[in-house]
């Protein structure tokens, strides 16, 4: 495995050589019922922030094994799952077999270049920003704005450094992994302020940020006309 955090394709392909490995690195468990329950929880958050409409084309940045797509796709016109890892996408294709309105797309890890401008209604990413450098988080927000249709919506989240539980994640990683031994995929937190700044700098309108379960920071906004 690459020791460089930013070598996302090599890092995440090496972590997902088998279905079990992929499930564990994505969520920490392999139970399909829990996968479904957690995906339903994500749908509740999307409904409360960007909304889910039957005429929408949704795109997920960092779809992994299709945890959310499997549950979301029946409620939308199209679901597009993008991921840097070909291994993840192969597993996702098996999990999503038979769903007629899904499409999987391998991406570079830094942009959404295969996706045309102004072609989707909602872009979201969940439990992904923690694995990206700050510059790459922001670049994905810029890319989301590019591919959204006018009026399209964007959602993102990350562990909230300013929350007690988020600070515990930060401290656990700091104490467990000395410099030179930190794994390339180690989680890095955000704050509500960071997410709001990125969304506003990218030019999103109607920007909102919030916290959840004393652990998550999340934000959403709309592309102007």
Image (cartoon, rainbow, N blue to C red):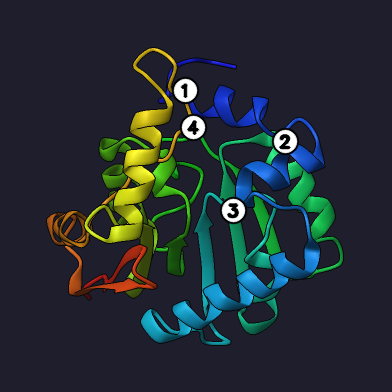
**Nearest to N terminus: mark 3 or mark 1:** 1
Q: Which residue is mark 4?
A: 185
Q: Name the residue: 18% across, 54% down.
A: 194
**Nearest to N terminus: mark 1 or mark 4:** 1
Q: Name the residue: 32% across, 40% down.
A: 171
* Disc ID at residue 7: 1
Whether residue 45 sits left or right of residue 88 in the image: it is left
Residue 184 or residue 137, whichever sits in front: 184
Q: Looking at the image, is mark 4 or mark 3 nearer the viewer?
A: 4
**Nearest to N terminus: mark 3 or mark 2:** 3
Q: Name the element at disc 2.
A: helix
Q: Name the residue: 19% across, 55% down.
A: 202
Quarter occupied by the C terminus: bottom left
Q: Name the element at disc 1.
A: loop
- The correct choice, above or below, for 35 with respect to 41 in the image is above
Q: Which residue is mark 2?
A: 87
Q: Which residue is mark 3?
A: 63
**Nearest to N terminus: mark 1 or mark 2:** 1
Task: Estimate the spatial distance between the alpha carbons at disc 2 and disc 4, rounded to whole Å.
Answer: 16 Å
Task: Estimate the spatial distance between the alpha carbons at disc 1 and disc 4, rounded to whole Å.
Answer: 10 Å
Q: Name the residue: 43% across, 22% down.
A: 182
């Amino acid at each position: 495995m690459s020791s460089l955090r930013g070598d996302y394709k090599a890092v995440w392909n090496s972590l997902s050589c088998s279905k079990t490995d992929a499930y564990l690195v994505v969520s920490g468990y392999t139970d399909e019922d829990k996968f479904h329950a957690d995906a339903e929880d994500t749908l509740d958050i999307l409904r409360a922030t960007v909304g889910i409409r039957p005429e929408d084309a949704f795109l997920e940045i960092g779809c992994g094994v299709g945890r959310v797509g499997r549950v979301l796709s029946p409620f939308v016109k199209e679901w597009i799952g993008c991921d840097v890892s070909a291994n993840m996408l192969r597993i996702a294709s098996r999990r999503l077999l038979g769903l007629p309105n899904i499409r999987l797309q391998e991406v570079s890890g830094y942009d959404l270049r295969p996706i045309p401008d102004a072609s989707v209604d909602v872009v979201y990413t969940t439990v992904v920003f923690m694995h990206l450098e700050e510059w790459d988080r922001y670049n994905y927000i810029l890319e989301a704005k590019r591919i959204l249709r006018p009026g399209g919506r964007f959602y993102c989240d990350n562990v909230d450094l300013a929350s007690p539980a988020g600070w515990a994640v930060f401290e656990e990683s700091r104490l467990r992994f000395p410099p030179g031994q930190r794994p390339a995929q180690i989680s890095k937190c955000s704050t509500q302020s960071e997410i709001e700044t990125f969304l506003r700098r990218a030019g999103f309108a109607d920007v909102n940020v919030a916290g959840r379960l004393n652990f998550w920071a999340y934000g959403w906004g709309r592309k102007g006309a």
